[in-house]
């Protein structure tokens, strides 16, 4: 029952904010993420505060993700919402917080996943601008490689519409190779792969892409990416691979300083 209620409330709230025009403000979903993440702290206080330190540390991580997503790209917020859902799933094994209601983790997981999916749909349909243009310098690698990534994503969409999911995923892999040096583009491609997995009911791809999207959001800025990795669940997320010559040329050009 809590799963049904969580999904229904998340989608209902999403539709309401769309109709009311609230989601035109890019701060909406980062704020939702902060509010959702704060409840475990409330439960810790209710239980006497024994788990408060651990809950605060986790809360701080999601606040940072919300701020980063608001300032740069809302795909980071999508990844963080999905990540918080996974945290809900494993919360009882990670933190002993006696104040958490028995029904809360599954309810929150369902809400998080549905809210993340709704935001992803709004971004993919370009109803919400994922990026904050004022936060990017025109000379950044991410801004220079963006056109190449978008060309591959467009080719993937065309292949999917043409009934060729295999070729569509190959273009997503090429987009991953191109964009993995930019946090924004890296997360964006993994979310596109996640959506591919959902559309084709590929459980392995869905599970794999959730973890990869979170890893891309957390580690790309630090250079923790295997060069040339194609990003699908059919290869190890830690494996470096040979970059095709045409993609290597585009990457090299994007790395040149102006």
Image (cartoon, rainbow, N blue to C red):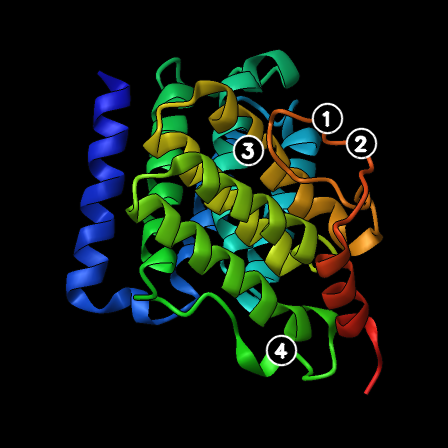
The residues bearing labels 3 and 2 have C-alpha atoms spaced at a distance of 15 Å
Disc 3 target residue: 209
Say which of marks 1 and 4 sits in front. Answer: 1
The residues bearing labels 4 and 2 have C-alpha atoms spaced at a distance of 31 Å
* Residue visible at 83% across and 37% down in the picture: 240
- Residue 143, placed above or below residue 63: below
Name which of mark 3 and mark 4 comes first in the sequence: 4
Q: How many C-alpha atoms fall within 10 Å of the one at disc 3: few (<14), some, or many (≥20)?
A: many
Name which of mark 1 and mark 3 comes first in the sequence: 3
- Residue 208, placed above or below residue 158: above
The residues bearing labels 1 and 2 have C-alpha atoms spaced at a distance of 5 Å
Q: How many C-alpha atoms fall within 10 Å of the one at disc 4: few (<14), some, or many (≥20)?
A: few
* Residue visible at 54% across and 33% down in the picture: 210
Disc 1 target residue: 236
Name which of mark 1 and mark 4 comes first in the sequence: 4
Residue 135: assigned label: 4
Asked whether the residues under the numbered discs 1 and 2 touch, taking CB atoms below 8 Å apart as contact, a structural biologist would say yes
Label 1 SS:
loop
Residue 95 image point, x, y percent: 63, 19
Q: Is residue 38 visible?
A: no
Disc 2 target residue: 239
């Amino acid at each position: 029952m809590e799963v049904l209620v969580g999904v229904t409330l998340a989608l209902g709230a999403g539709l309401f904010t769309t109709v009311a025009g609230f989601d035109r403000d890019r701060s909406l979903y980062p704020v939702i993420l902060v509010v959702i993440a704060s409840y475990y702290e409330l439960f810790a206080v209710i239980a006497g505060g024994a788990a408060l330190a651990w809950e605060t540390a986790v809360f701080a991580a999601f606040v940072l993700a919300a701020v980063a997503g608001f300032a740069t790209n809302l795909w980071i917020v999508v990844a963080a919402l999905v990540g918080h859902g996974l945290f809900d799933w494993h919360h009882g094994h990670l933190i002993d917080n006696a104040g958490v209601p028995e029904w809360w983790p599954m309810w929150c997981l369902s809400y998080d996943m549905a809210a993340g999916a709704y935001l992803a749909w709004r971004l993919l349909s370009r109803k919400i601008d994922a990026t904050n243009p004022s936060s990017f310098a025109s000379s950044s690698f991410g801004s220079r490689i963006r056109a190449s990534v978008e060309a591959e994503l467009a080719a993937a969409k065309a292949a999917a519409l043409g009934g060729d999911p295999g070729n569509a995923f190959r273009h997503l892999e090429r987009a991953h190779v191109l964009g993995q040096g930019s946090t924004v583009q890296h997360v964006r491609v993994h979310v596109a792969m996640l959506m591919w997995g959902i559309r084709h009911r590929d459980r392995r791809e869905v599970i794999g892409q959730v973890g990869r999207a979170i890893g891309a959001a957390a580690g790309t800025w630090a250079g923790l990416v295997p060069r040339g990795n194609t990003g699908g669940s059919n290869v190890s997320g830690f494996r470096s691979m040979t970059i095709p010559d045409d993609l290597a040329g585009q990457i090299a050009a994007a790395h040149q300083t102006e």
